[in-house]
Image (cartoon, rainbow, N blue to C red):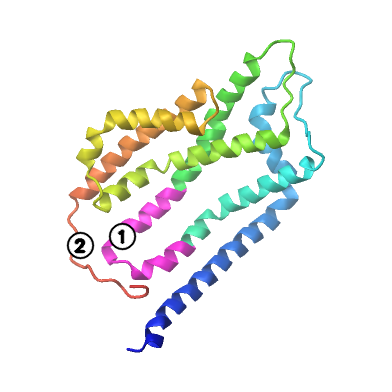
Amino acid sequence: MSDEDKALPLVEHLTELRDRLLRCLLAVLLVFLALYPFANEIYSFVSEPLRNLLPEGATMIATDVASPFLTPFKLTLFVAIFAAIPYLLYQLWAFIAPGMYSNEKRFALPLLASSVLLFYLGIAFAYFVVFPLVFGFFTSIGPSEMTVMTDINSYLNFILKLFFAFGLAFEIPIATVLLVWAGITTPDALASKRRYIIVGCFVVGMLLTPPDVISQALLAFPMWLLFEVGVMLSRWISKREPSDDQQPEGGHA
């Protein structure tokens, strides 16, 4: 086989990767264009947990000249990416699936779908559970003679950090299952390190959330519970007998 023949599959794979990346960018752009007319409404919805707790007469402010335009624009772009995640992961799946064994596909596809669902659940948990508690704490602890008037861009940066933190934290069961599935560790080994995992959850909560005990605990405890769920799933998967069909179905292999 000549060097030219060997290089051809790599060129084909790179071309396919380029095409799928372009599809992903186009999907995000289309979702963004569809959502942008509602950018102000989206920001109002996202800021509602704080606005509902502001003292009477207080409001959110824009301290930068361009903030009234750039902040809703930035939020809408992030929402477009979040909304397009199922399609983005589908493109990833379509690229790597042909090179996978059939038994790998049976596990990978449910894990991929579960990862999307868990990420959205993490964002929903942050919005509906964490935000009211955290903002209620922040708005009530200050001196009574001070009026809370939060900058809209600072608020957006704050909540995006929490959205990503909780979205990623809810992926712990998937990460745990993948570690066991790849043979890097075992469920028993993970369970034996439970005390260190719990300490690590609180350390991560301290690093990823604002410097208050409430938000740190609200991230650490779900991370620990999700770790336990991941260990139980890993035990169940490891007990299943491997399939006899170990051949790739074609494509990138």
Mark 1 or 2, nearer chain start: 1
Q: Where is residue 129 shown, x and y percent of the image?
A: 53, 29
The kind of residue tagged 1 is: Arg
Q: How many residues crowd mark 1 within 10 Å: few (<14), some (14–19), many (20+)?
A: few
Look at the numbered disc 2 and give the secondary structure of its residue.
loop
Q: Where is residue 31 shown, x and y percent of the image?
A: 64, 57
Q: Main secondary structure of the magenta part?
A: helix
- Residue, far front: 3
Question: In the picture, residue 52 is in which quadrant?
Answer: top right
The kind of residue tagged 2 is: Ser
The residue that label 2 is drawn on is 243
- The foreground one among 61 and 30 is 61
The magenta stretch spans residue 47: no
The residue that label 1 is drawn on is 106
- Residue, far right: 65
Q: CA distance from mark 1 to mark 2?
A: 10 Å
The answer to whether residue 222 is left or right of residue 213 is: left
Proximity of marks 1 and 2: CB atoms separated by less than 8 Å: yes
Look at the numbered disc 1 and give the secondary structure of its residue.
helix
Name the residue at 31% across, 60% down.
Answer: 106
Name the residue at 28% across, 66% down.
Answer: 102
Name the residue at 80% across, 43% down.
Answer: 66
Residue 193 showing in the rendered view? yes
Image quadrant for the C terminus? bottom left
- Give the number of the disc on residue 72: none
Read off the magenta span.
91-116
